[in-house]
Image (cartoon, rainbow, N blue to C red):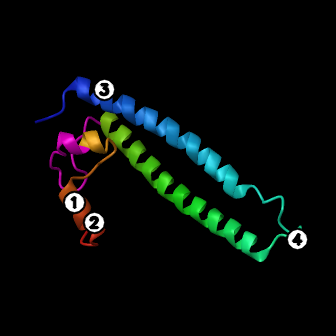
Amino acid sequence: MPLKKSEIAEFKKKLLAMRAQLTKTLQGSAAEVKTPDEATGYSQHQADQGTDDFDRTINLELTSKEFNTLKQINRALQKIDENTYGICDVSGEEIPAPRLYAIPYACVTVKVQEQMEKGQL
């Protein structure tokens, strides 16, 4: 059953809020990764340096995942503008409403997502 205009408006509102929050988070993460550690080179223990490097690596991985989510959110907002929100990008099938409520930026069905994760698409 196609989504109602009121439902799409709610999804758009959620997606815009998610995008704003994620953009703010990404800006903070990027600044944190770019900022050099002030204590580096001042008799810091090797283990401390290793921990800092590990933390920086984790931040970079999280930033990468968040950036990917931001791209998906932008795609979902684009689909709303194109009047194709709720339709799978790959199969053209309708994405079930419960999936959209769980993941408002979902642009593919669960079946297609599973195939993508298995490397079948």
Image coordinates of residue 7 in percent, x first then y, are: 24, 28
**Residue at screen point 62% across, 51% down:** 29
Q: CA distance from mark 3 to mark 2?
A: 29 Å
Mark 2 closeness class: few <14, some 14–19, many ≥20 residues within 10 Å: few
Disc 2, SS: helix
Residue at 21% across, 55% down: 110
Q: Which residue is mark 4?
A: 43
Quadrant in which residue 81 is drawn = top left
Residue stretch rendered in magenta on the structure: 82-99
**Pointer 3 with pointer 1, Cβ within 8 A:** no
Question: Residue 69, image x and y in percent?
Answer: 43, 50
In terms of sequence position, does the residue under pointer 2 or pointer 4 come before the other? Answer: 4
Mark nearer the viewer, 4 or 3: 4
Q: Is residue 98 left or right of residue 30?
A: left
- Front position among marks 2 and 4: 4
Q: Is residue 83 magenta?
A: yes
CA gap between label 2 and label 4 equals 48 Å
The Cα–Cα distance between marks 4 and 3, rounded to whole angstroms, is 56 Å
Mark number for residue 9?
3
Q: Nearer the viewer, residue 42 or 76?
A: 42
x then y, percent, for residue 66: 49, 52
Amino acid tagged 1: Val
Determine which residue is flagged by label 2: 116
Q: Amino acid at mark 2?
A: Met
Residue farthest to the bottom, as pictured: 46
Mark closest to the chain's N terminus, 3 or 1: 3
Please tell me which residue is depicted at 54% across the width and 42% down the height of the picture.
Answer: 23
Quadrant location of residue 1? top left
Q: Are marks 2 and 1 in contact (CB under 8 Å)?
A: yes
Q: Residue furthest left?
A: 1
